[in-house]
């Protein structure tokens, strides 16, 4: 029943921006913490950012602080990740995920706390 779908990835030059979107259906969207994750070739999955169900509390990995912004549109069941000042180190498959438990805060480093995942959208940043 739960469906999570990412979009917005693509190829950009270093210094440029992208905005990723994630739609989630089959759940009460505004009661779940959401997160963004990424996995680069040859590397383990990395938690990028998370946002609580209300959109008030957010967390960012050190690698993206000051450059990425997570937000959500609860009226339309959409999660966003605005990515600015992109570098080649940001090249990865980006995944959207929904926390397993309703109204529970969690951090993107705790991937096991997220129970519903999208298929990913590729971001490639060239120098």
Image (tube, rainbow, N blue to C red):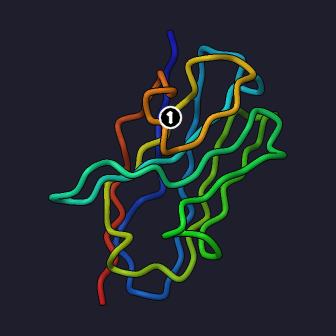
Q: Quadrant of residue 72?
A: top right
Q: How many marks?
A: 1
Which of these two is toward me, 46 or 11?
46
Q: Position of residue 15 (x, y in %)?
A: 48, 88
Q: Residue furthest top?
A: 1
Q: Residue at x 49, y 22 (%)?
A: 3
Query: Dot 1: what SS?
Result: strand
| Left or right of 121 in this view: 54 | right
| Left or right of 90 in this view: 66 | right
Q: Residue at x 30, y 90 (%)?
A: 127
| Left or right of 82 in this view: 1 | left
Q: Quadrant of residue 75?
A: top right
Q: Dot 1 corresponds to which residue? A: 97
Give the answer, above or below, for where 49 lies relative to 25: below
Give the answer, above or below, for where 97 lies relative to 69: above
Q: Position of residue 64 (x, y in %)?
A: 54, 69
Which of these two is toward me, 75 or 117?
117
Q: Residue furthest left?
A: 42
The residue carrying pointer 1 sits among few (fewer than 14), some (14 to 19) or many (20 or more) residues within 10 Å by Cα, namely many
Q: Position of residue 105 (x, y in %)?
A: 70, 32
| Left or right of 99 in this view: 121 | left
Q: Residue at x 57, y 52 (%)?
A: 49
Give the answer, above or below, for where 64 lies relative to 58: below
Q: Residue at x 37, y 65 (%)?
A: 10
Q: Position of residue 50 (x, y in %)?
A: 62, 46
């Amino acid at each position: 029943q739960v469906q999570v779908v990412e979009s917005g990835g693509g190829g950009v030059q270093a210094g440029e921006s992208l905005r990723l979107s994630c739609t989630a259906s089959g759940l009460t969207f505004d009661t779940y913490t959401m997160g963004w994750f990424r996995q680069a070739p040859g590397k383990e999955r990395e938690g990028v950012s998370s946002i609580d169900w209300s959109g008030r509390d957010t967390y960012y990995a050190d690698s993206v602080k000051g450059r990425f912004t997570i937000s959500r549109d609860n009226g339309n069941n959409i999660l966003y990740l605005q990515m600015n000042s992109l570098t080649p180190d940001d090249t990865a498959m980006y995944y959207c995920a929904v926390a397993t438990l309703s109204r529970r805060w969690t951090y993107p480093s705790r991937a096991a706390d997220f129970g519903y995942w999208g298929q990913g959208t590729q971001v490639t940043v060239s120098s």
